[in-house]
Amino acid sequence: MGTPVNASQEAAAAPEWWTALPAGERQFLRRLARLVRAARRSRAPEVARAAAKWERALACFIKVRLRHERRGGGRAH
């Protein structure tokens, strides 16, 4: 684990596509990531393997999607 950071350090290090998200959406994505990380620590090997695979896939999809939306000039609702 890394060194704990305060909110201002986290905000300074966070990419613009993340900081531009509404707070509720950031909260949802954090909880989703937490859920998948917990599944990755499952005692069932097949669950842990699947969670690790999905964690990578979801992270990639979310980053690409958010970067694309930022470049496109707005968010679709």
Image (tube, rainbow, N blue to C red):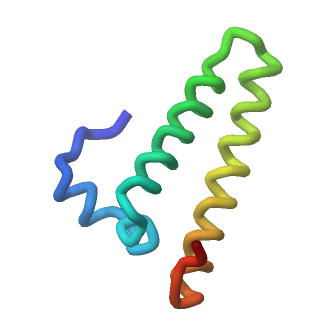
Q: Position of residue 37 (x, y in %)?
A: 57, 31
Residue lying furthest top in this view?
43
Residue lying furthest front in this view?
77
Q: Quadrant of residue 8?
A: bottom left
Indicate the quadrant containing the N terminus: top left, top right, bottom left or bottom right.
Answer: top left
Image position of 18 with respect to 56: above or below: below
The residue that appears at 48% across and 38% down in the rendered structure is 31
The residue that appears at 56% across and 31% down in the rendered structure is 35
Residue lying furthest right in this view?
46
Q: Position of residue 51 (x, y in %)?
A: 71, 32
The residue that appears at 46% across and 44% down in the rendered structure is 30
Q: Nearer the viewer, residue 42 or 31?
A: 31
Residue 72 shown left or right of residue 53 in the figure: left
Q: Position of residue 11 (x, y in %)?
A: 26, 61
Residue 64 shown left or right of residue 7 in the figure: right
Q: Quadrant of residue 20?
A: bottom left
Q: Nearer the viewer, residue 8 or 21?
A: 21
Picture mark count: 0
Q: Position of residue 14 (x, y in %)?
A: 35, 63
Q: Nearer the viewer, residue 2 or 33?
A: 33
Image position of 66 with respect to 45: above or below: below
Image position of 63 with respect to 42: above or below: below
The residue that appears at 73% across and 41% down in the rendered structure is 54
Image position of 51 with respect to 17: above or below: above
Indicate the quadrant containing the C terminus: top left, top right, bottom left or bottom right.
Answer: bottom right
